[in-house]
Amino acid sequence: MACKSADQKQPRRIGKAPRQYKKRAAVHAVEDEDHGDFLVRINDERPSPENAYAYGVNANSYATMKVEGKSVRFQLDLGATCNVMPRKVLKKHNISYQVDTNHKTLTMYNDTSIKSDGKTMLKMINPRTKKKYFEKFVVIDGGGTPLLGSRSIQHGHRDGALQQNTSGSVQQKQVGQAYNARGPDRGIQSQGVFTGLGCLPGECHLEVDESIKPRIHPPRRVPVSIKEQLKRALDDMTEEGVIEPVTTPTPWVSSLVTVSKPSGKRRICIDPRDLNEALKRSHYPAPTIDDLTPELRKAKVFCFLDAKNGYWQVVLDEESSLLTTFNTPQGRFKWKRLPLGIKSSPEEFQRRLDQALEGLAGVKPLVDDILIWGGGETLAEATTDHDRNMRSLMQRCRERSLKLNPDKIKLREQEVPFHGHLQAWQFIFTQLSDNV
């Protein structure tokens, strides 16, 4: 049942409260009234696995943060849409605060009610990274463990702050599960959009200047320590249909480049410097932040998505595929998908992404990033508009076989970093942090 103000009509009760818990429990997940009807749960301190999955809750996830200079331990709950701070915790740590006059009565699914003192803004500092935050909390009567909701968790994960200060695990994909669990009116039907390798319509053709003589590079030596990793990476990409072995003579052969990814896997690229000298560009105009800014006048709610595997969603025709042949210790391979490093790759991918998302309101792609926003006179109107735009985007992704990265989702935010800028409600400014 969703937490609603006491003077509003209560939604139908879903299920019954566990009989073995007769003692009144503390609030574990509540709803901010501005964000629609969401699911909530009462903290019994022993959540069942099915409840933990349904609400995106990990009962063992905690983070210690400095609140107005005092160390406070928070429980992290991806199912909560606002932050909760018990009054006793504020008094215990002698934290001064001011609340607004908007008092709310939070009603739980078992008909128990908790009155709040209102909302307050508190300064938080991560003691490990020294990152500073200002977060809004609902102050409630009584004690219990302070709670950080989904929005604050996403803010912390955006720049790696919470990962370095968390006991337990919070996965970004759980945010998507919690988002989709909000019901048919709010949830976004995204089946198939976050799995597999995308395939945008049409084939890409690379043209070369015939006056430039083709070049063939010999295989580069690879350290013994990474040979097995390299072989696994090549095998995986071959199985996915990204590359393919070559046995016939080809006029162009580039060198292999491999780098280590943060996950420990190998990233396979080519060194196409000689090939780039011969390639002709299509000179497709790339959009800029300045082009986007006028469209965000009334934007209040944002979402950030990332095209999964980026350029690999563009298929090369056979002639172009042969141009991208490269040498490895396992023999020659050619790219069946558009590779990194080719000088025309960014504009070719941008053109196809623009064509795939053309005509969608509140959606703007820039390279492999996609910004979605909702506008309106009020936050509620903007949220409704945002969800409508998201549904349209998911439908278009299914139609055009555009795949998105489930690990880089920022949902229903009031600010998101986007290409060196922080897109936020009522202001847009350059983000100077190196993490953007």
Image (cartoon, rainbow, N blue to C red):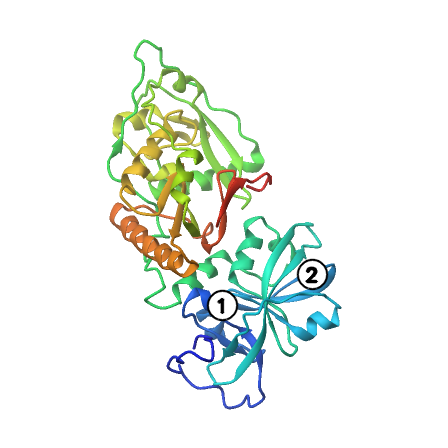
**Residue 63, position as x, y percentages in the image:** 64, 62
| Residue name at image x 47 percent, y 54 percent | 413
Q: Quadrant of the N terminus?
A: bottom left
Residue type beneath disc 1: Asp
Q: Position of residue 401 (x, y in %)?
A: 28, 46
Q: Earlier in the sequence, mark 2 or mark 1?
A: 1
- Relative to 44, is 379 on the left or the right? left
Res 294 quadrant in image: top left
Mark seen at residue 8: none
Residue 274 visible? The answer is yes
Q: Quadrant of the C terminus?
A: top right
Residue name at image x 60 percent, y 59 percent:
135
Q: Is residue 392 left or right of residue 56?
A: left
Going by the numbered disc 2, the residue's amino acid type is: Val
Q: Which residue is mark 2?
A: 67
Q: Position of residue 327 (x, y in %)?
A: 42, 26
Q: Which mark is residue 32?
A: 1
